[in-house]
Amino acid sequence: MDKIGIFYGSTTGNTRDVTHKLYEALGKGKAELHDIRETTAADMAAYDRMIFSVSTWGAGDLQDDWEEFFPSLNTIDFSGKTVAIMALGDQHNYPDTFVNCMLLLAEKVTERGGQIVGETSIEGYEFSASTAVRNKRFLGLVIDEDNQANMTTARIHDWIDTIKKVL
């Protein structure tokens, strides 16, 4: 399938809304949106290029719908597939587990043969720890709608310029 599959889970609506901004910024006809709670492993496996959009809950956990879908990832062969991850988190209230959920998805994709793309700089964020950081870069795009909503659109557009080359 030529289009990018965008898979998101949202509890409060923030992740859904930010994912729709990402979808619109990618351009008409370039991607297809999928709510993870209505997604099957076969739906996801049909794409060679994907974006996972997830929010962090509790102590760096996956959002509930992603948590429920997570075991299904074990049935998908990600060999030859490219995945970018966008994670929402709250750096002020959860500075020691900021967007930890990103690592869970990244590790599962690479474990199953896929490639993670779309790293971004940690500059401009204030947090004390995150398992989603490697060499001073996040494993994907990080959005903080609670504290930096005014930066969301610019971060999305900058990220799209980067991932277009590899996704």
Image (cartoon, helix red, strand yellow):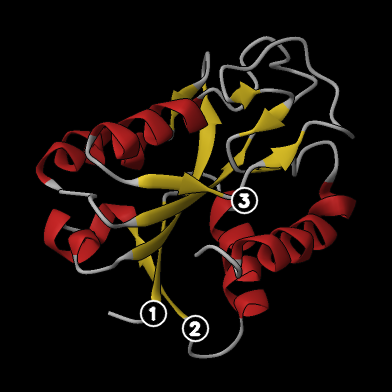
Q: Quadrant of residue 69?
A: top left
Residue occupying image coordinates x 33% and y 36%: 110
Q: Mark 2 = which residue? A: 30
- Vertical comparison of 124 with 129: above or below: below
**Label located before the other in sequence (1 or 3):** 1
Residue occupying image coordinates x 54% and y 30%: 56
Numbered disc in front, either 2 or 3: 2
Question: Mark 3 belongs to which amino acid?
Answer: Asn
Numbered disc in front, either 1 or 3: 1
Disc 2 is placed on an element classified as: loop
Question: Mark 2 belongs to which amino acid?
Answer: Lys
Q: Position of residue 51 (x, y in %)?
A: 46, 57
Q: Mark 1 = which residue? A: 3
Tag of residue 14: 3
The answer to whether marks 1 and 2 mark residues whose Cβ atoms lie closer than 8 Å is yes
Disc 1 is placed on an element classified as: loop
**Label located before the other in sequence (2 or 3):** 3
Q: How far apart in space, not on screen, are marks 2 and 3 (Cα)?
A: 22 Å
Crowding around mark 1 (Cα neighbors within 10 Å: few <14, some 14 to 19, many 20+) is few
Residue occupying image coordinates x 69% and y 61%: 162
Tag of residue 17: none
Extreme bottom residue here?
A: 28
Disc 3 is placed on an element classified as: helix
